[in-house]
Amino acid sequence: MNNLSINSGRKIAGAIVVPMVIIVVISVFGIFGVMYWSAHLSDRNAEQSQHTLIAGAMQLSQNYLVKQQTGVVIWEEAYHVVNQPTPNESWIYNNMTHWLYQNHGFTKSILFDRECDVMNLYARDHTRTWATEDLMDDLQPAVAKVRARYISSMKKTPSGLYRFAPEYSDTRRSIAETGVVSIGGRPHLFTAAAVVPQILSISKNRRPPVTLVSLVPLEGEKLNDIAEMSRLNGFVLTDSPTTRAGAGRYLLHSPRGRNIGAIGWNTKLPGSQMLNRITPFLALAAFMITMVVIAVIIFTRQMTKRLARSEAKAVHTARHDALSGLPNRTSFHALLTDSLQKGTGTSRNTAVVYIDLDHFKDINDTLGHSAGDMVIVAVAQRLKRVIPDTGIVARISGDEFAMVIRDCESDEWLEYILDQVQDEIGRPIMIGRRELFASLSMGVAVAPRDGDDPDELLRKADIALYDAKANGRSRRSFFEAHMEHHVQSRDRMSRELRLALQNDELDLAYQPQCDTGGRRIVSVEVLARWTKDDGTVVSPSQFIPVAEETGLINELGIWVLNKACAKAHDWPGMIVAVNVSPNQFKHPRFVEKVMAILAANNLPPQRLEIEVTESVFAGRNDSVLKALRRLKNLGVKVALDDFGSGYSSLSYLRRFPFDTLKIDRDFLSGMNGNAEAEAILVSIIQLGKALGMTIVAEGIETVEQLRFLQMHECHRMQGYYISRPLSDAGLAEFLTEFNGDSTGGFGTDFSYQPRKAGMIF
Ligand code: C2E
Ligand code: MG
Ligand code: MG
């Protein structure tokens, strides 16, 4: 998988998963947070209301104490007794302090006189040590308040006397203050009340009252009463003022504000209770959400991985050739551009090599496409093996490869590498049990020498490849400026030729062939001619190869055949010889087209002779031979043109039963009394005859050559000596003259002088 795709896969996963996880985590924490926060709020509210409840209960309980004390402090008799200079202590004991203990549980009492000094102390256990100064100080504010309120409730009458305000005595509501004090570390509720007469009392001046403070320990029943009133559980007195979860605290303060302990209770926490109930569900929901998130993350990761993998695969497929696994043309271009950029500024060269497998199509045609594929794969592997590590190998098209070789130290070094490439590819390739030998042609362009633009280098490497192929394949060419000119002129010619075909600028020339006796013209070779608008004549040796390269040959060939067959009616009985290039046979319906042309022109196949050169055998192309055989079976004559100009002509004679053998004109030009050349010529004639073929000699330029061939009974003769290629009209005239000659053409006295002027093409 390529890194780019993995990264983009990670990016996608990151883009989806990270925000999702963040959202989920925030949501879960948010929900929990809100739950805990609202639970806490509701707990605090509950605690506060419980606190208020206790405060209320405490107040109620203290009010109750006040009421219990009222009977003793609002009393005529008590008022008189306590206001005596020497109060009767036993009366006070029996009717007030002890009475309060017996009837209402006030375990302690203190009676302050009008000067606020302790007048009488009472304790159920008869102790006095509890009446500490600290206690007195704690009680002082309450006692002082009672005294102040008493004074302020004395209203002056018009007579100048002071009258005790009736609202207290009438309603039997005492002037009292309540609170909590600590005695020996034990909190006590107290009520301090002024001892007042029940009936209206009048005095001369305003004096503070005698004040009775009654105390009851805040424990046992008292505490239970408060608990019951507040309807709270787990009531307990505690020294610790600090609260803990589930335990409320009601702090007890003395009137001076001193902390003297606290009432603890089990707080009812509805929020926490609700939370406790809901937490398992929330935890389960959080767990499930987590699971879902994990599942989604895993799924997303897998999906993104799969996506990244398929993206990488798609990128790889888009950039690579499926068969060889090598980078393809597009990717090669990008890699080359990259290489050139990296190479800029270095003194080293970068070579671009175009490679073409020689005759690969033949392998495909003869051994099948799977064998062709195996060859491609083998070649690809070998190229990869042999190229330097920094190099690039790509498959450009069918049998075309390309390489980039970087950091070329020198041309010699590059040549060495290319030698290795050629050697490696030259080793046999095993296809099943068959050994195949591949060869390749290479075109090389080197940057910066030949340019530094990738397209320019590729174009130049291609031109060099063309040169290598044109010069006989299995070789390599380095780009040179003149090659470009050649390519340019070829391109120009191909364009012009196409136009010429369209504009009917092509014509045919006809070169007659006479029989052995030289008295009769038995056949005519049809030769393509191209005269441009400006009158320039282009030789077929120039434009036919261009037509072959560009594929125009098919169109051109059909045009020639058509015209030749149409003309054939002007020369009854004569054979019309038409040159056909090997490429034309590659057209799958070539034979059918020939037959259609013959039929259209109503020409018997026997009158058509097709001239092919030995290049039809190149690459063991069976399909060409098959087509030839079909034509021959249909009656068309097949001639082997330019025999002897190639290398292994003799073997071709065994591979196909040609009707006619055209001896290359080089044999004739080489004659001129040369005994060896004559001997070869004679043996070719004999060999052809032995194989039952018609022998045609071309390129006869002298009478000697003619006589020699006549002597050896060559069947047909062609050459400038007999006639140059002629125009249509020129041939008609030539035939009239030739056939009308009383001596009968060339005969044997050679009196006929061939016409060369006027209508010669
Ligand atoms: P070719 O088929 O071997 O044609 C014979 C060539 O020899 C012709 O050249 C002809 O003009 C030339 N020739 C004939 N007699 C003599 C002679 O006595 N001395 C010399 N020096 N040359 C002689 P041309 O017309 O220039 O044609 C060249 C080649 O072009 C042909 O060679 C043939 O291979 C190809 N060609 C011409 N027309 C066609 C065509 O219509 N189709 C195809 N496929 N090839 C064609
Ligand atoms: Mg020919
Ligand atoms: Mg020829």
Image: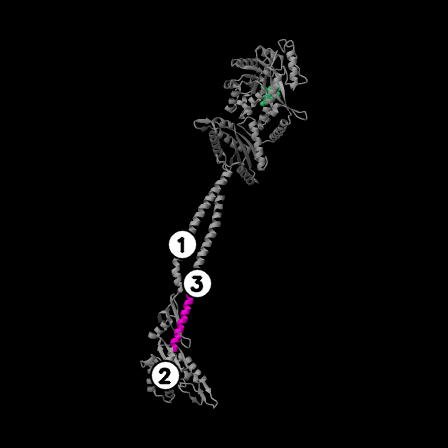
**Which dot marks residue 38?**
3
Q: In the picture, residue 82 is in which quadrant? A: bottom left
The location of residue 301, given as percent across then percent down, is 45, 47
Task: Verify CB contact (< 8 Å) between mark 3 and mark 2.
Answer: no
Of pointers 3 and 2, the one earlier in the residue sequence: 3
- Position of 626 compared to 726: left or right? left
Q: CA distance from mark 3 to mark 2?
A: 52 Å
Residue at which label 2 appears: 72
Of pointers 3 and 1, the one earlier in the residue sequence: 3
**Which dot marks residue 247?**
none
In what element is the residue under mark 2? helix
Q: Which residues are magenta?
A: 39-63
When the figure is inspected, residue 231 is found, relative to residue 636, above or below; the finding is below
User: At label 1, which amino acid type do we have?
Assistant: Phe
Residue at which label 1 appears: 287
Task: Specify whether residue 99 is painted magenta.
Answer: no
